[in-house]
Image (spheres, rainbow, N blue to C red):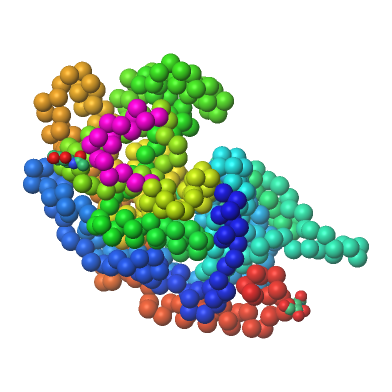
Amino acid sequence: MRSWGRRGARQPKQLAGGPRGMTVLLPAAMLILLICTISLFSRIWRSSPSIRVEDIDINKLWEPAPAAGWRPSSAPRSYWPSPPIESNGYLRVRCNGGLNQQRSAICNAVLAARIMNATLVLPELDTNSFWHDESGFPGVYDVKHFINTLRYDIHIVRTLPEITSHGKAKKLKAFQIRPPRDAPLSWYVTDALKRMKEYGAIYLTPFSHRMAEEIDDPELQRLRCRVNYHALRFKPHIMKLSRDIVNKLRSQGHFMSIHLRFEKDMLAFAGCLDIFTSEEQKILMKYRKENFAEKKLVYQERRIIGKCPLTPEEVGLILRSMRFDNSTRIYLAAGELFGGDRFMKPFRGLFPHLENHNTVMAQEKLDDSAQGLAGAAVDYMVCLLSDIFIPTYDGPSNFANNLLGHRLYYGFRTTIQPDRKALAPIFMARENGRVTDFEERVRQVMFNTKFGGPHRRVHPESFYTNSWPECFCLISARNPADRCPPENILEVLEERLQSGSSNVAETSNNTGLVE
Ligand SMILES: *[C@@H]1O[C@H](CO)[C@@H](O)[C@H](O)[C@H]1NC(C)=O
Ligand SMILES: *[C@@H]1O[C@H](CO)[C@@H](O)[C@H](O)[C@H]1NC(C)=O
Ligand SMILES: *[C@@H]1O[C@H](CO)[C@@H](O)[C@H](O)[C@H]1NC(C)=O
């Protein structure tokens, strides 16, 4: 993983300023054009899910879902002042968890800085807790692009500045606070802000899930989308490798990606142990004891309420029931699968064209990085760009959930979300020998699920999983709130920024905006 960090340490210079940096507020199509050449808006209307399942044309699933006139848009739609020159202080955060938990934490940090009129210090990524990766934010994300993209929203600096006291220069010390879980915005502009004004800088740690996801301000929600879908761009070497993988896969036609969450930590968390040998069960129970709260877990009970991750074989049976044939090409995004090849074999028997980033790019040695943030980032990009995406488990703010949101924003790209609770009794009946109508029953469940079009967010669905309608707009909307922002919104924001900063140029050294 080290070599990834080093290879990526060199950055092209042309990203600063200029029209390139403005992609943030253009339609997502710009972003897409950077990555690959798919048209965002061409899509075929798909038959509604209420029709008989026999009539469903599986080939339509390779196309994006119907958009009904909506397009992604996260530019401000109402008056959006430039960040004030006079900052209330510095905000440091430490984002814990894996790549995707950190991703939503970074969005929250930007929001916090905006409402506090604070200068954000480049977020710290907790790199040694789970992934054993030391590359941090600059090792995974394009820092210049991040700072530049958010220049109409907040000031960002790479590190805390030095201060001079008693004639000596030293680093400003940030006052450490542990924010309440899902803290409301009001906590930031009262408690946290008070400390910030007192000390000049605060350090919020840990910082995952420390800001409420549902907030009653669509402009602030759109800021989250600007961060998540525009400002957070992986480093060029990650983008290139992802694009190479996707181009290679796509050169033979469409492909689907599956996030096969059949890994030790997930299985230990879910507590669905009965399918494993007693040796394996011991390993999982030990892991569970060391990492999660104690809880009585009965396999059949867990399974029937949809809490057990799908096994690779179950995923294969679902796809076959849906009439995907054995020529279907599948990219597997996953860490190390637990239980060895015993579980993969039945799946491979049904779908032999299985790939992962090591098989597609055999000449590039990725084994070490596969566990690190960079490996997860490549998987993320390939899953984002694939024609169909299938998560096998979903939990708060993980890889699958973020991808569901990103694929929605990226043009309503098809996702297939198996309803594990509805499928469990069908699988259990099959295990008890009832095989005759198995495929038909699975089909009934599968074609009754959503495939990724615009849909209302229903609690506990997260904003990071579904940012409709805040981050989407209609060209001609009846409701003014849904109307797309004016075409020249970028010029307006740029003008506002210029006029605000021209008379105070001497203080701009601290803002990080001067490259
Ligand atoms: C932030 O600055 C704006 C002016 O740009 C001001 O209206 C707002 O009250 C300030 N908020 C805080 C928390 O300082
Ligand atoms: C795919 O399935 C067909 C039967 O439907 C079979 O003839 C063929 O050998 C299979 N191909 C592979 C690679 O398993
Ligand atoms: C800002 O930076 C420039 C060089 O980048 C330097 O010449 C100038 O003195 C700095 N101003 C302040 C106020 O630090």
Q: Residue furthest front?
A: 363
Residue 509 vertical position relative to residue 274 in the rendered view, above or below: below
Residue 358 vertical position relative to residue 268 in the rendered view, above or below: below
Q: Which of 307 and 338 is in front in this view?
A: 338
Q: Does residue 320 appear in the picture of this structure?
A: yes
Question: Where residue 131 appears, x then y in whole percent?
Answer: 55, 42
Q: Which of 313 and 301 is in front in this view?
A: 313
Q: In which quarter of the image is residue 342?
A: top left
Is 34 left, or right, of 99 in this rendering?
left
Residue at left offset 21%, top offset 27%: 426
Q: Magenta span covers which residues?
A: 340-356
Q: How many labels does the image show?
A: 0
Question: Where residue 339 appears, x then y in whole percent?
Answer: 41, 27
Question: Where residue 425 appears, x then y in whole percent?
Answer: 23, 25
Magenta span contains residue 289: no
Is 336 left, or right, of 50 in this rendering?
right
The quarter of the image holding the C terminus is: bottom right
Q: Nearer the viewer, residue 168 or 321?
A: 321
Is 75 left, or right, of 197 in this rendering?
left
Is 41 left, or right, of 496 in this rendering?
left
Question: Where residue 262 appears, x then y in whole percent?
Answer: 39, 34
Q: Residue furthest top?
A: 278
Magenta span contains residue 347: yes
Residue at left offset 44%, top offset 53%: 363
Q: Does residue 232 appear in the picture of this structure?
A: no
Residue at left offset 54%, top offset 63%: 142
Residue at left offset 68%, top offset 51%: 203
